Amino acid sequence: MPRLVILLFGPPGAGKSTAARELAAEHGLKLYDRDDPQWTSERQFRAALAAVGQARDVRAVVIRAGATSTARAKAGALVRATHGYLLDPGPDVCTRRVRARRRGDLVASTRAVATWYTTRDHTDAVPAWPGHLEEPGTWRPVRLTQRGTSYAEKRKRYGYAHQLAREAWKKLLPLPCTVCGKPVTVVMRWHLDHTDDGAGYLGPAHERCNTGKAAAKKNRLAAAETRRINAGGNWLRL
């Protein structure tokens, strides 16, 4: 039988487990669900998924949260998925289902729903779960660089236009670093700082400043948004 590895993504309460059990029963697949008691740690679960990716004739269905295209791409590469689908019924439905479970992880699961919807993106255009298995090739995860940024995004931000802009800014040095404010000189290792949307440039920044800025800013914004939703979202009140 041909190799078959199906990835199901979505927040808690999206119906991933139900869909996975139906697929497993219909197609004779082994189910990999992190919530099963046999998996005592994320490291152990990832080791099992790595074994799935290395097997030639495996037939499995794997459940992962996969809020971002980067997370989905990494999961797809780990298990060498043949299919990938997204289950996204909306935060209200997910929260209602999480409450209906009446399990001991209500608070953690509800917060996980909020975090998932705060960080989600659709860069890879992963298809919605249609309710039945489709032909292979329905989902092609984005190709990642070593740091987890897609090659398409890298090309857009660091192509020929970026090189021309860097040369133009280089002629204006020394200038204050856009992150720390200290001088950036020609002899230093420096980057050209992008605007948040990647459409323009703010000016030169020290390499160490610019490298750490993006991750720190993203973490701060994500945490602030999650706190805002947790405090003000009616659907999150326990």
Image (cartoon, rainbow, N blue to C red):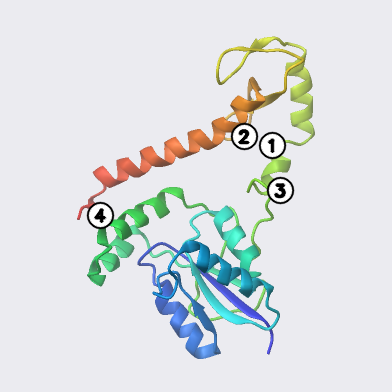
The residues tagged by marks 2 and 1 sit, at their Cα atoms, a distance apart of 6 Å
The location of residue 40, given as percent across then percent down, is 43, 68
Badge 4 or badge 3: first in the primary sequence? 3
**Residue at x-position 56% and y-position 72%:** 48
Residue beneath label 1, please?
157
Which residue corresponds to mark 3?
Answer: 151
Q: Which residue is disc 2 drawn over?
A: 198
Using the numbered discs, state the Cα–Cα distance from disc 4 to disc 2 in whole angstroms. Answer: 33 Å
Image location of residue 54, percent across then percent down: 68, 73
Q: What separation in Å lies between label 3 and label 2 (alpha carbons)?
A: 14 Å
Quarter of the image where the N terminus is located:
bottom right
Where 98 sits versus 190, above or below? below
Query: Which residue matches tag 4?
Result: 235
Give neighbour class at mark 1: few <14, some 14-19, many 20+ (Cα, 10 Å): some
Mark 4 lies on a secondary structure that is helix
- What kind of residue is marked 1? Arg
Crowding near the residue tagged with mark 3, few <14, some 14–19, many ≥20 C-alpha atoms within 10 Å = few
Q: Nearer the viewer, residue 31 or 88?
A: 31
Mark toward the start of the polypeptide (3 vs 1): 3
